Image: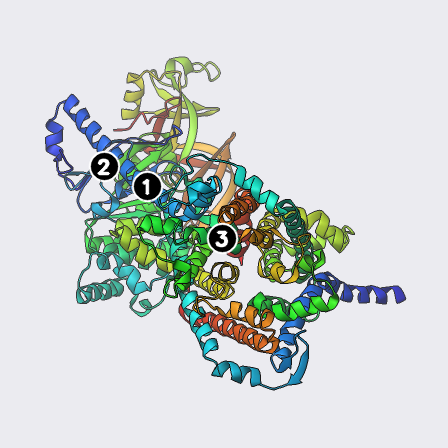
Amino acid sequence: MSELVLKNICKEYENGFKAVDNFSLEIKDKEFLIFVGPSGCGKSTTLRMIAGLEEITTGELWIDNQFANYLDSQERELSMVFQSYALYPNMTVYDNIAFSLQVRKLGKQEIDKRVQEVARLLGLEKLLQQRPKDLSGGQRQRVAIGNAIIREPKVLLMDEPLSNLDAKLRGQMRVELAELHKRLGNTIIYVTHDQTEAMTLGTRIVVMKDGIIQQIDAPKNLYENPINLFVAGFIGFPMMNMIKARIMIHEEMAYSQRGRSAYAENEMFYVFEKNRIQVTGYVKEVLLEKDYRGQDVIIGIRPEHISDRPTMNATQRITGEVIGRELLGSEIILYFSILDMQLSARVEATSTAQVGDKMDFFLETDHFCVFDEKTEENLMYH
Amino acid sequence: MDNSISFEKLASFTEEEREAFHEQMKERQISKQRMRKGIRVVINIVVALFVLLPLLYAISVSLMPSGELYTLELNLLPKNPTLRNFADAIAKVPLVRFVVNSFLVAGLITFGQIISCSLAAFSFSFLDFKGKNALFMLVMATMMIPGEATIISNYLTVSGFGWLDSYQVLIIPYLTSAMGIFLFRQFYLSFPISLYESAKIDGCSNLRFIVGILLPLTKAAIGAMAVYTFINAWNMYLWPLLVTGSNTMRTVQIGIGMLDSDESQSIILMIAGVVMIILPSLSIFIVGQKQLIRGMFQGAVKG
Amino acid sequence: MKKEKSNIKKMRIEPYMFLIPSFLVFGVFLFFPFFKTIYLSLYKTNKMGQAKLFVGLDNYTTLFKSASFYNSLLVTLIFVAIVVIGSMALGLVTAMLCNKTFPGIRFFSTAFALPMAIASSSAAMIFKIMLHPSVGIINKLLGTSINWVHDPKYALVCVALLTAWLNSGINFLYFSAGLSNIDETIYERASVDGANGVQQFFRLTLPGLAPIMFYTLVVNIIQAFQSFGQVKILTEGGPGESTNLIVYSIYRDAFFNYRFGSAAAQSVILFIIIMVLTLVMFRIERKGVKY
């Protein structure tokens, strides 16, 4: 079995607030698992329950096939990197890294060997005699990681470890962390509120909201096949475009255009204001089967699936007014409005569109996600 | 049953067995936590008894008829508690007068220190003038001069003034303190200078700024200072011992010594007196403790 | 033009006005007597304390030839050592006990801080009866019949422990403040790192208290040097001269023997000792405790 199993874990505070509700998860060996969600979603609480810093109200926690709900932190043999790093201010970098070995009373030489090794790995060789207050944010971060990995723990917990760094350093540390994971090959459980971090680092991602797991999936699946509106909106930047539309079928539409029959029988459309987008294939089958005729849905489409010119896939045209333009080097994000909706499209840097332009955009209908308007669930989730 | 149960084994349990297992583990955890808390409380009680022993014993003795004290048995608690010792002590020496004196002296010292220290601290933190740093260092340096090292000269000075055995001799030498100036200054420095500047622009005089704005904002520091100063003034010993001679001027700490004579009953009267004069300072301390801690350490932490 | 000038002048004087009350008191009752003490220490005085005959350092050389003075210094040092160690240990233990919340913590923290509200003279009177050879509770509890304050072996220790008890209250407050300043998460990290309570205490708590510990040490030493009331009431410097602390010795020389010159010289020495100790310790702090 896997090293870590969480089964129906709940955390309820004395005031009745449920921070984590029915959290179940098996964590496999060598995974880089991410808990992600907005602040207050219970991700850190879950991590702290695993570490033994927070009591588990109900449910079971298994570590190494051992019932661990009531084990003290000391007995769990996990490592953890804290958001604030929690470096010991009175100790040198050397002692900070060596601490967990020192309290286990390992031999001085053995400790020294391993500290040097870790210091080399993290580029801290020259700082070993410094104290935490003399270090930069990035260096402190490394010391905290050094302390966590020196024990070669099977499971390494990280609580928002990069959130105190500036953007540039964060990017750099992200790359280093990914490399570190490859090299050390241990299991990492990593908490973050930053979906970019989650997507770039994780082998598997747990998206949480209000204490409840929304979806557990690999980054690619999460991106392409979100289970509901929340996950769809939370993952990805710029955010997925959301378009409210009504499902209409030929019979109701047939004579709307000046009495002429414009559409073949039984054709299905998403309709929002004057725009009509034909629904075909699998999506149509699902919508028919679930009987969404005449009902409102929300269409989700990622900015990269909206183009400023027609292509093989991008066939459905809509017209909007450009309200913003962001150059991201090789590409441009165009923000445009249709009615009272604001959408964004990721287009090539050669685009000459300017703010205020009225222009056509083309949608790749194959990449639509369709959500029920009320339950917010993805009707296409598979 | 212990932690070493395996996942598979638990999975094979029936629902009831599983629940029973959870119950049992939870109970064990709760009792473990109770144990830890219990041990902490027990140790606290033991140490608190140790710390409070002198005080509790004094109260106990002050309630004993004198016959009960003079036995060779272990007599922790009075068997026939009586308040007679208090009445006797008050009859024997003018204790009420001493208490009034002490309240007067300690109260005026406290009041005076708060005024003089806040004025000086205001000047040191909001105003600019020549020699500011040097003068402030001088104030800080006075903390190093032990009061006992200057007591002889002070005695000679006040006797030269003809002040011996008066209220002013008990009060005036203590009307300021370096610690008070330091404490208030720490507080004032935590306010933005714009607070002062905008008051100035509004045409507020310095004195009105102190009274109207600064003092209300530093209630915590004033409270701490008041508790600390009052207790210290109430407990003064060496100085009143030197400069007061008559019953009309004695403070409680000196006056209580008059109960100490070779008569066999005197020792119990003395303790009754001690209990009576400890009460005011203890009550002020207990009431003002929170204030004292907040005021003293808020400033200290910021510094 | 004229008005403006007077305004500037007013601005210049005003800051000093606020200092006048404090500096008047400091001047008359601290600075002046401080120098007067030094001055007196160089003279022989009459019984009224008036300087009569300049003798240079005679008062000092006499002191340094006197066995009594050396005894007084030695006794004071032993006393200060016991008081400081005892009161800091008690303060630390009580602060640790009230570090985590538990039912009744408010009562206990008040109890542990309480000794700071008690006068040294009142405490001495209470101890006088507690240490009484025949009816005192200490002898009864220990099953001994020691004449504590009249036995040269015990008198100093008794006075010192009484003082340690008195001073422990404020140490409790200092250490409590120090403990609350230690970042809670380093204990969490230490638990995950596998450190047990004892290891956490010695490797995190004690070093974390170092800055406040240092400050407390300085304050405690200065305070211990100045103990007077308990000696006066409990032992009057005796038996023999076994509790003749320097402050008591100053008091006795000046107000019983009317040797104001010699007492002044001892005052100056007391001042120098305290000043040197303070400066040395601040020096050590700047070198040692860096964070």
In front: mark 2 or mark 1?
1
Q: Is residue A1 visible?
A: yes
* 3D distance between C-alphas at marks 3 and 1: 30 Å
- The numbered disc on residue B158 is none
Vertical placement of residue B173 versus A228, above or below: below
Which residue has dot 2 on it? Answer: A69
Which residue has dot 1 on it? Answer: B42
- The C terminus of chain C - image quarter: bottom left
User: x, y (%) of residue A164?
Assistant: 41, 52
User: x, y (%) of residue B38?
Assistant: 31, 38
- The N terminus of chain C - image quarter: bottom right
Q: Nearer the viewer, residue C62 or B150?
A: C62
Vertical placement of residue A50 versus C202, above or below: above
Q: How many marks?
A: 3
Graded by Cα atoms within 10 Å as few (under 14), some (14 to 19) or many (20 or more), the crowding at tag 3 reads: many
User: x, y (%) of residue A29?
Assistant: 17, 44
In front: mark 2 or mark 3?
3
Q: Nearer the viewer, residue A194 or A241?
A: A194
Chain letter of mark 3 equals C
At 37% across and 25% down in the image, what residue appears?
A376
* 3D distance between C-alphas at marks 2 and 1: 28 Å
At 47% across and 39% down in the image, what residue appears?
B65
Q: Is residue A162 visible?
A: no
Amino acid type, label 2 = Asn
Graded by Cα atoms within 10 Å as few (under 14), some (14 to 19) or many (20 or more), the crowding at tag 2 reads: many
